[in-house]
């Protein structure tokens, strides 16, 4: 708080200099000498009170004495009919320092001394002087009370933090003891059969008695294990890491259904957010844990390619994802053993063939897959055969089959120049190459 007071003192000092520049002095040398002393004292006392080690009653008393002296010297430098003292509001710095250090009592004492001194230096008590005195007498104790309240709150918060830390440490030690005892009991139960039937029964009885004593009343904690957000009708398995393990558990899946299985599996029929609650029962206490699960439906992936057919490799294709709503993850399988996780990948096929393209998208924990069969074709065109009979009548057109893959630019059929027979030539043109079978 004294650091904040330093800032206030600087502002009050600037106000002091400004007001005296405006109003002036009857005796200028003496007046400005007094102002200079107050400015220097502001720097000195701010440095002294900034450190707790130097914050002694002597500095506080000297600070108040300087303020009182400045008020007393005002008539000597301003004349008997002055309206405002030389320090003016600057004296608030000394009063607030007393309020902070000695709380409301210190603020009240400083306010009374400053008020009495101010009134004693004036020939009469005006309304403005009364207002200043009233503000000092009210402000000093009120600031002291506020500081006292803040100090008490800080002490209470510190005590609460220490108590919480101590409780956490006790809980940690209790759990450590509990885990150690359970390990010993488990060892007795596991090794008991080596001692015979009586040893096995002893181990089992010790474990049951320990769990039924109510020891867990102050140490049990229910904790839900992490789980993935599912899609509609997709089963999700719930589990917990409660320590110690409860005697029984009641699950509420948030959609009106419940289960008493230790690790139940459940599926949701509709989209939405659901609050999953597990209530664990111990010997004489109950603990609860909750967690929100988001159920959604998987979007159907959709995509296009800028080019799907080529007669030779390498062949570069730009794929564009058109899935709506836009997913957060993508997994492309280009059918040639290569994959990508980009949204709009560019892929180069280095071998010929017919390739299926698969896109799997994920959004909000929901995944969907689309497969386009024979989507990309990289192979040279092949003329299967010339169909029909090779002999034909004049002015008739012989039958023929198409080119595989289908020509994408043009197919031309040209008979040779002959009067009696026509040999048919097909020229197939596809992107990237030309094929002209010869007779």
Image (cartoon, rainbow, N blue to C red):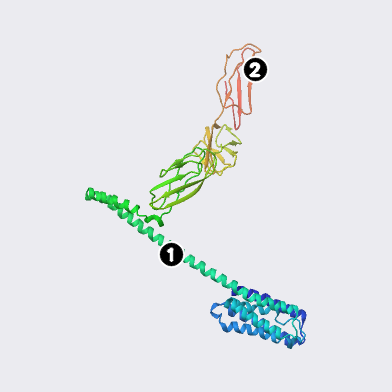
> Which mark, residue 327?
none
Q: Residues within 10 Å of mark 1 (few under 14, many from 20)?
A: few
| Residue 266 position (above or below residue 23) | above
Residue underneath mark 2: 417
Residue at the spot x=43%, y=64% of the render? Answer: 166
Q: Confirm whether residue 304 shows in the render.
A: yes
Q: Position of residue 386 (x, y in %)?
A: 57, 19
Q: Nearer the viewer, residue 272 or 407?
A: 272
Q: Farthest residue in the left direction?
A: 196
Q: How many marks?
A: 2
Q: Farthest residue in the top direction?
A: 393
Q: Confirm whether residue 332 shows in the render.
A: no
Q: Nearer the viewer, residue 127 or 47?
A: 127
Tell me, yes or no, whether the two marked residues, 2 and 1, touch with CB atoms within 8 Å: no
Horizontally, residue 368 falls left or right of residue 218, namely right
Q: Nearer the viewer, residue 397 or 10?
A: 10
Q: Nearer the viewer, residue 28 or 314?
A: 28
- Quarter of the image where one finds residue 214: bottom left
Horizontally, residue 17 falls left or right of residue 215, namely right
> Which mark, residue 166?
1
Horizontally, residue 123 falls left or right of residue 314, namely right
| Residue 110 position (above or below residue 411) | below
| Residue 340 position (above or below residue 157) | above
Q: Position of residue 200 (x, y in %)?
A: 26, 49
């Amino acid at each position: 708080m004294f650091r904040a007071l330093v800032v206030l003192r600087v502002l009050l000092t600037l106000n002091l200099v400004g007001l005296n520049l405006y109003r002036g002095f009857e005796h200028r040398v003496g007046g400005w000498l007094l102002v200079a002393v107050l400015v220097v004292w502001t720097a000195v006392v701010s440095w002294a009170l900034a450190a707790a080690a130097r914050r002694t009653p002597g500095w506080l008393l000297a600070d108040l004495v300087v303020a009182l002296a400045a008020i007393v010297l005002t008539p000597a430098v301003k004349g008997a009919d002055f309206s405002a003292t030389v320090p003016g509001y600057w004296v608030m710095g000394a009063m607030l320092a007393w309020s902070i250090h000695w709380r409301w009592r210190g603020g009240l004492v400083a306010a009374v001394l400053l008020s009495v001194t101010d009134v004693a230096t004036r020939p009469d008590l005006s309304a403005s002087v009364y207002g200043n005195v009233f503000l000092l007498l009210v402000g000093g104790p009120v600031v002291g009370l506020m500081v006292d309240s803040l100090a008490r709150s800080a002490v209470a918060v510190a005590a609460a933090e220490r108590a919480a830390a101590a409780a956490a440490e006790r809980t940690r030690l209790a759990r450590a003891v509990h885990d150690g005892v359970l390990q010993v009991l488990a060892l007795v139960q596991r090794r008991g059969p080596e001692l015979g039937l009586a040893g096995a029964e002893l181990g089992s009885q010790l474990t049951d008695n320990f769990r039924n004593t109510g020891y867990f009343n102050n140490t049990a904690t229910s904790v839900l294990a992490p789980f993935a957000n599912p899609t509609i009708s997709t089963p999700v398995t719930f589990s917990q890491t409660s320590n110690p393990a409860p005697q029984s558990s009641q699950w509420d899946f948030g959609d009106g259904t419940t289960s008493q299985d230790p690790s139940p599996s459940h599926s949701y029929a509709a989209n939405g957010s659901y609050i999953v609650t597990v209530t664990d029962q111990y010997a004489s206490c109950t603990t609860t844990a909750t967690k929100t699960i988001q159920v959604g439906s998987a979007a159907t992936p959709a995509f296009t390619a800028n080019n799907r057919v080529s007669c030779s490799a390498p062949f570069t294709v730009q794929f564009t994802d058109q899935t709506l709503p836009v997913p957060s993850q993508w997994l492309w399988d280009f059918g040639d053993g290569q994959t990508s996780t980009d949204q709009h990948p560019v892929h180069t096929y280095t071998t010929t063939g017919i390739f299926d393209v698969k896109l799997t998208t994920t959004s909000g924990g929901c995944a969907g897959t689309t497969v386009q069969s024979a989507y990309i074709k990289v192979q040279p065109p092949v003329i299967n055969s010339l169909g029909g009979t090779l002999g034909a009548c004049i002015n008739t057109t012989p039958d023929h089959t198409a080119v595989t893959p289908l020509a994408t630019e043009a197919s031309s059929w040209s008979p040779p120049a002959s009067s009696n027979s026509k040999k048919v030539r097909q020229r197939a043109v596809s992107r990237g190459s030309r094929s002209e079978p010869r007779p």
